Image (cartoon, rainbow, N blue to C red):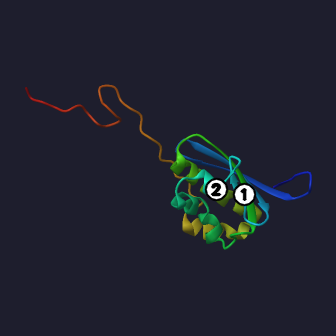
Amino acid sequence: MATNKTDKLIYAAIGRRKSSVARVFLTPGQGDIIVNGRKIDAYFPHKTLVLDATAPFRATTTEGKYDVKANIVGGGYSGQAGALRLGIARALLKANSDFRASLRLSGYLTVDSRVVERKKYGLRKARKAPQFSKR
């Protein structure tokens, strides 16, 4: 928790998913969500990604009560939406620790550590091998 020049509470948190990192700043407000300087609906190309990223607000029934300003770097849209979801959930937890049970039950505080497996030499991808022929 920190304060800025206008003495407005700011709750900051970081969310990571795949190779994306989201820095999230939560302030009490009207529910505006700004991602990399653009509204969330304009930033993410699919409505499902917006619903996924804002799911912690529905789990805690705080939709429209907090403004979000997020800076996201790395990865694609899916990883960025997952990173934003984790960042929002962690910031909500800092805002009110009573949200822990509902966020944990919904799985929004669990870090998804799955990343792309590295490519191995002699293979086309991580596990895909060239076609085998006996002759």
Q: Residue furthest right?
A: 6
- Label 2 packing within 10 angstroms: few (<14), some (14-19), many (20+): many
Q: Count the labels in the image.
A: 2
Residue at (76%, 63%) from the top-left corner? Answer: 95
Q: Give the number of the disc on residue 99.
A: none
**Residue 47 relative to residue 132: left or right:** right
Task: Give x and y (percent) for residue 117.
Answer: 41, 38
- Of residue 44 and residue 58, the one placed in the foreground of this image is 44
Residue at the spot 56% in from the left edge and 63% down from the top edge: 51
Residue for badge 2 = 40
Q: Which residue is mark 1?
A: 68
Left or right of 37 on screen, residue 41: left
Say whether disc 1 or disc 2 marks the residue closer to the N-terminus: 2
Mark 1 Cα-neighbour bin, 10 Å: few <14, some 14–19, many ≥20 = many
Residue 5 percent coordinates (x, y): 92, 51
Q: Secondary structure at mark 2?
A: helix
What element does badge 1 sit on? strand
Q: Nearer the viewer, residue 46 or 93?
A: 46
Is the residue 55 above or below the residue 19 in the image? below
Q: Is residue 130 left or right of residue 25?
A: left
What is the three-letter code of the residue carrying label 2? Answer: Ile
CB atoms at circles 1 and 2 under 8 Å apart? yes
